[in-house]
Amino acid sequence: MAGEEIMFVPLGGGDNIGASCYYLKLGRSNILLDCGRGFDGGKFSFSPNFYTLLKFIDSLDCISQVYISHSHLDHVGALPEFLNAAPHCAAYMTQKSLILTAHQFNKNFNKNFNKINKLNNFNDVLINRVTPVSFDQSFKFKFNNYNYAVSFYPAGHIPGAMMTLFEYRDRYKIKNILYTGDYSLRQSALSGGCVLPDANKDIDILIICAVNVLRRERVNYNSLDIIVNKVLRVLKAGRNVYCFAPQLSKGIELLKALNINLPENFRIYIDDAVFNLIKKFEVTEPIINYRNYYIDEEPKDNAPHVTLSANKPRYKDYMLKPVRSRDVFINANFSLHDDFDLTLKFIKQINPKTAVIVHYDGSHKDVSVSVEQELMRDAECRTQFIFAENNQAYYL
Ligand SMILES: [Zn+2]
């Protein structure tokens, strides 16, 4: 019956990566999953396609709730802009995501991003409009006779990341819909792996951010272990390393891994961007140790060391500091996503009736190596796959 259906429309981050934002209509409830900003080569950025959304609702303010999975900018970067256009919409994310999001919207953290965004009231919008949620919490929303309940689960990936479970009741039955956001089964140094809903919660629809759903040949192409080993090899060969860790928590993740894995005589120098973020984390977890130094301290001797920074090295600094000019540059942009085999395992474990794949690279679509192809041969798997495309409506 009209009005009760479930509809799903990617406004960005469907068959591409960047500006993740998905419209989910549960009967009369209009919901957004994430509200990110995409970045093109670091210079240009783009918002989700809100024009598509206006084909289905009268104004952006008809959206009543937006759930933010985690604090990476491709999932939260367009939130202040959206909330300004939708004054009655409520936003939800974990407390940790809120802290990390506010940190990124701070002028000094990401100069490019703030140049692109003309709004200067980011943090006011966040503080006034976001309701922090926790993993033991559940909310109910009711519209006429149709309603849904929502609850949250740790997603792994980065600290604060959550999966969102919707239990939607239409006229006939309850349907369970799980949105993963970026997630990882694999444990990382800072955040454990994801925690799935009870096995007795039968998931009807899984909406999954599955970066590696198609690309078997590139499994684990850039894992944290590989980078740590590379650093170690260079240091042992007597040379310095300059590690560039550009994305939010990756610098901290790498620092923790280096502190654990490098022999004690190697020192690690960190810069402001990494240090200030560490202060946000250290409340719950000590990260800095005796071998970590501030980047401006002169090296005490010529023993090889690591410089860890969220910025690319500046040429003029190289000229001023001959010691650092011998650094070997390593781009520490490792993947925080599950590889192909783990993606397979995750979908198998949940075994949803429908898996809606988003956040994948549609231009590389080669069905012969997709998770779908692999699971077709599995007798226990009941899953039908939808590879969702941007701006297309799917009735589920
Ligand atoms: Zn992410």
Image (spheres, helix red, strand yellow):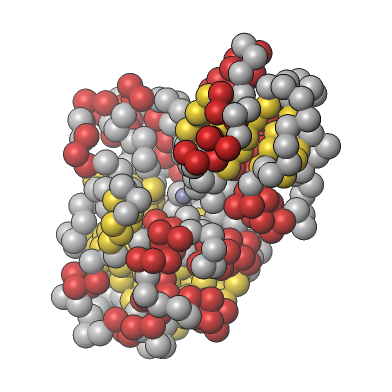
Q: Position of residue 353 (x, y in %)?
A: 34, 48
Q: Where is residue 96 in the image (x, y as percent from the top left)?
A: 63, 62
Quadrant into which the N terminus falls: bottom left
Q: Where is residue 261 in the image (x, y as percent from the top left)?
A: 71, 24
The residue lying at 60 percent from left, 57 percent from top is: 160
* Residue 213 sits above or below residue 301 on the image: below
* Front-most of residues 296 and 308: 296
Residue extending farthest right = 290
> In this rendering, would 218 be left or right of 298?
left
The residue lying at 20 percent from left, 77 percent from top is: 54
The residue lying at 31 percent from left, 47 percent from top is: 41
Q: Quadrant of residue 64?
A: bottom left
Q: Quadrant of residue 348?
A: top left
Residue 29 appearing in the image: no
Q: In which quarter of the image is residue 300?
A: top right
Total marks drawn? 0
> In this rendering, would 363 be left or right of 357?
left
* Front-most of residues 34 and 3: 34
Quadrant into which the C terminus falls: bottom left
> In this rendering, would 350 be left or right of 51?
right
> In this rendering, would 262 be left or right of 131?
right
Residue 218 appearing in the image: yes
The residue lying at 77 percent from left, 57 percent from top is: 283
Residue extending farthest top = 237
* Front-most of residues 372 and 66: 66
Q: Position of residue 176 (x, y in %)?
A: 43, 60
